Every structure is written in C-alpha cells, then in structure tokens.
Image (cartoon, rainbow, N blue to C red):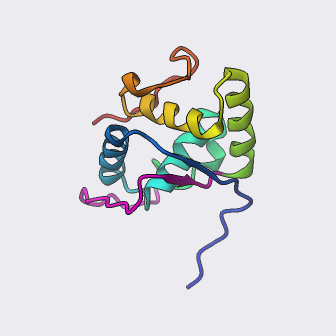
C-alpha cells in the first residue's frame, strides 16, 4: 500500500553533537513518531509557527507504543520539513546571523533536548526549547 504524499518538502542536513543525538534518539523512542527525521520535521513546524504541518507528533490518531530503541546508521541527520516550514527556517537562520541552516538546526536541536552548552552560534534567547518531558 502506498503512503500518502507529504507534499512539497525542503531538505536540510545537519550534524548534531553526539550528546544531542543521543538525547534526540531517546525522545523519539518515547514518542509514537515513526523516525528521527519526522520527529524533527514536526518540532520544526511547531518552532516556526506552522502547526498544520505537524504530521505525527502528538496526533490523537496515533496509537501509543512501548518505548523502543532508535538506531540511526549515520551521524548526520537529514530533515525534510514541509516547504513552508523550510522557507521560514531559512529566514530565521538569516535573521539570527547563524552562518548556515545546518548550524541553525544543530543549535536548535541542542536547545530542544536541553543541552544549551552545545549551542555554537544561535543566541539562546531567540529560540525557545520545545523539550518534551523526559
């Protein structure tokens, strides 16, 4: 059975610090979201103020599952948010003065998982961490 289209999407790759990746994997394992990439895309949609582009995070239609192990093969993280989310992210990155969208995402994820000491460029006051209860 074919999956429904996710619509037009952007593509961003980032390299979070290993500690950030581990915390992110833990959050995803406790959620009912299908992948790390989808989890991050959903959190980014909330971050930029476009909750209508959240596909799986906190959806009532998803059945809660037992916590699972999330095993990624690569250190880099590819995120494919909706194109409107992607456009807003790019504007936020440019407005913040962060050198690249990849660094903006890595810094945002460090704040999201509660590890602000791993932020390299992003002003910590500009982004509110959307950390879920651990």
Residue at left offset 59%, top offset 75%: 3
Question: Which quarter of the rendered picture does the N terminus lie within?
Answer: bottom right
* Extent of the magenta region: 61-81
At a point 37% along the width and 22% down the height, the residue shown is 117
- Foreground residue among 124 and 102: 102
Residue 2 locus on image (x, y percent) = 59, 81
* Relative image position of residue 52 (x, y in whole percent): 65, 46
Q: Quadrant of residue 86?
A: top right
| Magenta segment includes 76 | yes
Whether residue 57 is in magenta: the answer is no
Say above or below: 114 vs 71. above
Reply above or below: 106 against 67.
Answer: above
Q: Looking at the image, which residue is at 75% across and 41% down? A: 87
Q: Residue furthest bottom?
A: 1
Horizontal and vertical percent position of residue 13: 58, 50
- On screen, residue 86 versus residue 34, left or right, reads right
What is the count of numbered marks?
A: 0
Q: Nearer the viewer, residue 16 or 28?
A: 16
Residue depicted at x 50% and y 55%: 37
Q: Is the residue 64 above or below the residue 57 in the image?
A: below
For residue 101, which quarter of the picture?
A: top right
Q: Nearer the viewer, residue 48 or 19?
A: 19
Residue positioned most to the top: 125
Residue 118 image point, x, y percent: 40, 27
How would you classify the magenta stretch by its main secondary structure? loop
Residue 8 is left or right of residue 128, and the answer is right
Q: Quadrant of the C terminus?
A: top left
Q: Is residue 60 left or right of residue 42?
A: left
């Amino acid at each position: 059975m074919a999956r429904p289209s996710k619509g037009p999407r952007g593509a961003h790759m980032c390299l979070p610090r290993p500690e950030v990746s581990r915390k992110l994997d833990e959050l995803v394992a406790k959620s009912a979201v299908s992948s790390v990439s989808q989890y991050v895309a959903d959190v980014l949609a909330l971050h930029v103020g476009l909750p209508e582009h959240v596909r799986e995070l906190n959806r009532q239609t998803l059945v809660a599952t037992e916590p699972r192990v999330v095993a990624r093969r690569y250190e880099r993280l590819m995120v494919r948010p909706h194109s409107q989310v992607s456009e807003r992210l790019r504007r936020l990155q440019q407005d913040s003065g962060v050198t690249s969208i990849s660094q903006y995402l890595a810094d945002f994820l460090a704040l999201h998982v509660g590890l602000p000491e791993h932020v390299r460029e992003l002003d910590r006051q500009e982004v509110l961490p959307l950390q879920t209860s651990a």
